[in-house]
Amino acid sequence: MQDEDLGKTKLDHVLSYIAIGAMEFLEFTSILFLPLLAVQQTVLYGVNHPDQVLTLLIVLMLIISAYAVKLIKDWRRK
């Protein structure tokens, strides 16, 4: 952050810090709310198409489980 040009006046510095704070807040909320939005849309779609959603969730669970097993095996080797 020290390499950034915040401007020459105190007002420029304050506005720059406000913009940086807003950017950090938006980044945090996007990380937090995008997965929740995906879950919400899956639930809403699953109300009308439960057979497709259950199949998709089972496939995702198998893929994630296989990846977790690989990570645990690699972790134990170290």
Image (tube, rainbow, N blue to C red):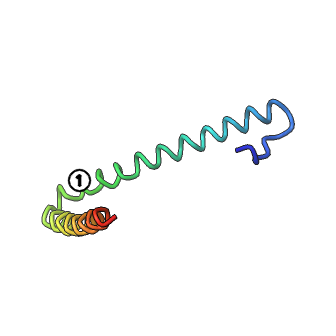
> Which residue carries the number 1 mark?
43
Q: Quadrant of the C terminus?
A: bottom left
The amino acid type found where label 1 is placed reads: Val
Residue at point 47%, 43% (across, down): 29
**x and y percentages locating residue 75 in the rendered image:** 31, 62
| Residue in front for this viewpoint, 54 or 28 | 28
Q: Quadrant of residue 66?
A: bottom left
**x and y percentages locating residue 24 in the rendered image:** 57, 42
Query: Compared to 73, does 20 lie above or below?
Result: above
Residue at point 44%, 49% (across, down): 31
Number of labels in the image equals 1
Residue at point 33%, 55% (across, down): 38
Query: Compared to 20, does 55 lie above or below?
Result: below
10 horizontally vs 57: left or right: right
| Residue in front for this viewpoint, 57 or 51 | 57
Residue at point 13%, 66% (across, down): 51
